[in-house]
Amino acid sequence: MIDPTVRCYRAGHLWRDDGWHAAATFGVDAHGRIGPGDAPGEALGEWVLPGMPNLHSHAFQRAMAGLAERRGRSDDSFWRWRETMYAFAAAIDPDALQAIAAQLYVEMLKAGYTQVCEFHYLHHQLDGTPYAQAEAMSLALVEAAREAGIGLTLLPVLYMAGGFDGRALAPRQRRFGHGVDSYLRLVDTLRRHQGDHLRVGIALHSLRAVPPHALREVLASKLAASGPIHIHIAEQTGEVDDCLAVHGARPVQWLFDHADVDARWCLVHATHLDPAERAQLARSGAVAGLCPSTEANLGDGLFPLAAYQADGGILGIGSDSHISVSPVEELRWLEYGQRLATRQRSIAAQHPGDSTGETLWRAALRGGTQAAASPARADLLVLDDTSPLLAARSKDTLLDTLLFAGNTPLIRHVMVGGHWQVRDFHHRDQARIAKRYRQAVARLM
């Protein structure tokens, strides 16, 4: 007997954990989960993939993409970019944040991201005074994700100090700040909103912004016992030097010496690792959260990809500052950066005959799902099999083509939790959301 609550679909090829399955049929139940399909169902096309998690996002920074590209009077660096970002962040209120985030999340969906980890530190008003509803800025992101239809892993950020030496927050950082008690109250309040499309975890901004005593208190709390834990770490060589000067240890080394880092953790960037740190990160089961387009834009450096893979390390990708919103571009530049540095090809593919595209896509799916604590939802991407770029492609070449054949959009339909959010390249509410975004950015500028 056919279950009328299950919608059935067919795909020429469906990607599952163990690779491509030809002539696949499946169902999506009323709870938005994939299971068996008992009827012929709708033909989706030749190529159907699971949606990609985006494990690192600062949504408000999408609206400043392209505004920090003029050279300063001295050597340009991450630290000068940060000053531009602080000035822009000063103008963001809950309405503007929701407008920007909803537009960004629509762009993410159309690009193939179906879950986003929002590393959120714009908590308060500009002078550091909490909003009347302390979680107002966080709820703006929750509502933006609901509007767009993307899954959200909300990571409210603890940000307490202006440097490794424990200095007070600068005036432009005050709206980021929390004490440990108020921070844990915020996390507890937000967890009451959790559901299939919302997960709430913990984020420690960085070792320079979270003093050792605060890190211990947060990790000892009941709230840290479940859910993901994310932290920026070892992004810049200056950060490594400062950590060595104050703590006598490199950042990743110090973290492992003072915290039980395991599979709940995502170490964002982790760009500058020595071999011992790299091996320890791989052994821990934590995720290295790599953001190649932002890391390139900021001049951060290159993650030691091949050696980390050889150690068995887990990785995922994020779009971070959103100068690019594309999992294809993140994975392509993860590989291309390594090729430029080594003057070799096919770095991610570890064994003769391995597909570089398939290796990267599989790794990012695994690590992103782990870092986002993504639920088992029907999150699917249907590729445009009418595109000339996919002509005569087989399952052995499909993902290499997707990643390395240019920038033509190839994602035709996007499903999240059993609901179609994008059909024929068009998001169901993109016109209204884009109009509000344009109005919000005009006010900010």
Image (cartoon, rainbow, N blue to C red):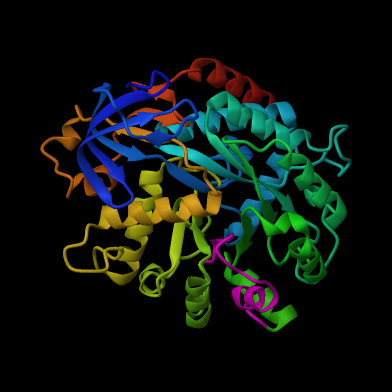
Q: Is residue 417 something one can see in this rendering?
A: yes
Q: Position of residue 118 (x, y in %)?
A: 61, 44
Q: Is residue 444 something one can see in this rendering?
A: no
Highlighted range, magenta: 249-270
Q: Quadrant of the C terminus?
A: top right
Q: Residue 407's image quarter?
A: top left
Q: Position of residue 82 (x, y in %)?
A: 65, 52
Residue at far front of view: 1
Q: Position of residue 336 (x, y in %)?
A: 32, 58
Q: Is residue 253 magenta?
A: yes
Q: Where is residue 357 in the image (x, y as percent from the top left)?
A: 27, 53
The relative height of residue 433 versus residue 372 in the rendered view (above or below) is above
Q: Residue 165's image quarter?
A: bottom right
Q: Is residue 406 magenta?
A: no
The relative height of residue 286 versus residue 35 in the rendered view (above or below) is below
Q: Does residue 8 appear to the left or right of 71 in the view shown? A: left
Q: Does residue 368 appear to the left or right of 237 in the view shown? A: left
**Which is nearer the eye, 74 or 214?**
214
Q: Does residue 438 appear to the left or right of 391 in the view shown? A: right
**Which is nearer the eye, 385 or 63?**
385
Q: Residue 337's image quarter?
A: bottom left
* Residue positioned 46% across, 42% down in the render: 324
